[in-house]
Image (cartoon, grey):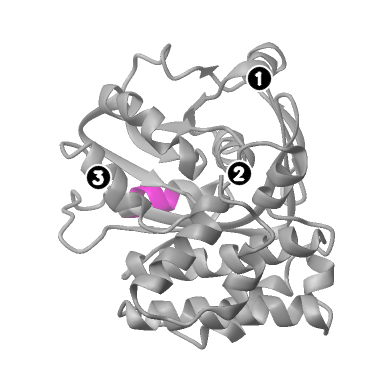
Amino acid sequence: MKYLIAGTGGVGGSIAGFLSLAGKDVTCIARGAHLQAIQTNGLKLKSDLKGEHALAIPAMNAEEFNGKADVIFVCVKGYSVDSITELIKRASHDKTVVIPILNVYGTGPRIQRLVPEVTVLDGCIYIVGFVSGAGEITQMGKIFRLVYGAHKGTQVAPGVLEAIQKDLQESGIKAEISPDINRDTFVKWSFISAMAVTGAYYDVPMGEVQKQGKVRDTFIGLSTESAALGRKLGVEFPEDPVSYNLKVIDKLDPDSTASMQKDLARGHESEIQGLLFDMIAAAEEQGIDIPTYRMVAEKFTKH
């Protein structure tokens, strides 16, 4: 199968790197100095799971790509989704599946509305991956788990989800086909929101969230409030969401930080809208009390 990675940042670059190492057919979409470096020197992957590699992966900007892909992983930030609609339309054939891997909730249905003629799934990822230099991706830690699946009512040709899973697993990615992707993307949103917002509010790495005290208490408060929203929306959690979030945070590299936190620190555009303000708006719409979210929101002016 031909894979197209739209957005070669920490997530997309890690997926592309792992697929390429396993000999899969993968093409990257990137831009600017990052793209130029990949085209000149290959994609540099520094991975705790795979070691260091320079990979000759075809890379271009969205406008230059004129082929067709069987699987399109959408790994751009939430605020860039609309910009890749034309690429998806152009790169799809009648059996193409699109798998958004974003931190914000509701991305699959949102992209499906933009490209109604293409089969759009949904997905989420658990990884610490980031751009560590032009053309260079760093993957930290031992967690690389990708969950994807079809929303209710989305028809996928038989065997396609399993074929993708096989390719990902052969590449060293823990790939799971979700029976309830709406639930799993909400669970991920809840976790990333609490993690990124806590880290950015106190400007600390995850090691500080792993210690008892006010930083961890804030993370617990945020997790509790998003869990209440999830229950109101009809999400059936497989286990207590707060315990789950704590379990995940405690496995992270203590030096790691969320990409939203990195972007805010550098003055770049960030996912604060999707991870903080959208959560607040959704909770208010459902009449959920969210004192912790309101407290942290006071520090951040809406972008």
Query: Residue drawn at (58%, 83%), measured in percent from left and top?
Result: 242
Q: How would you classify the magenta stretch by its main secondary structure?
A: helix
Question: Which part of the image, by quadrant, shows the N terminus?
Answer: top left
Q: Position of residue 80 (x, y in %)?
A: 46, 35
Q: Quadrant of residue 236?
A: bottom left
Kind of residue at disc 1: Ile
Q: Is residue 117 left or right of residue 269?
A: left
Residue 96 shown in magenta: no
Query: Residue drawn at (83%, 68%), measured in percent from left and top?
Result: 207
228 or 12: nearer the eye? 228
Please tell me whether mark 1 sits on a helix, a strand or a loop: helix
Bin the neighbour count of mark 3 within 10 Å (Cα to Cα): few under 14, some 14-19, many 20 and up. some
In the drawing, what numbered circle is on residue 269? none
Of badges 2 and 3, the one in the foreground is 2
Mark 3 lies on residue: 112
Q: Which residues are magenta?
A: 162-166
Q: Is residue 166 left or right of residue 69?
A: right
In this rendering, the answer to whether 156 lies above or below 32 is below
Bin the neighbour count of mark 2 within 10 Å (Cα to Cα): few under 14, some 14-19, many 20 and up. many
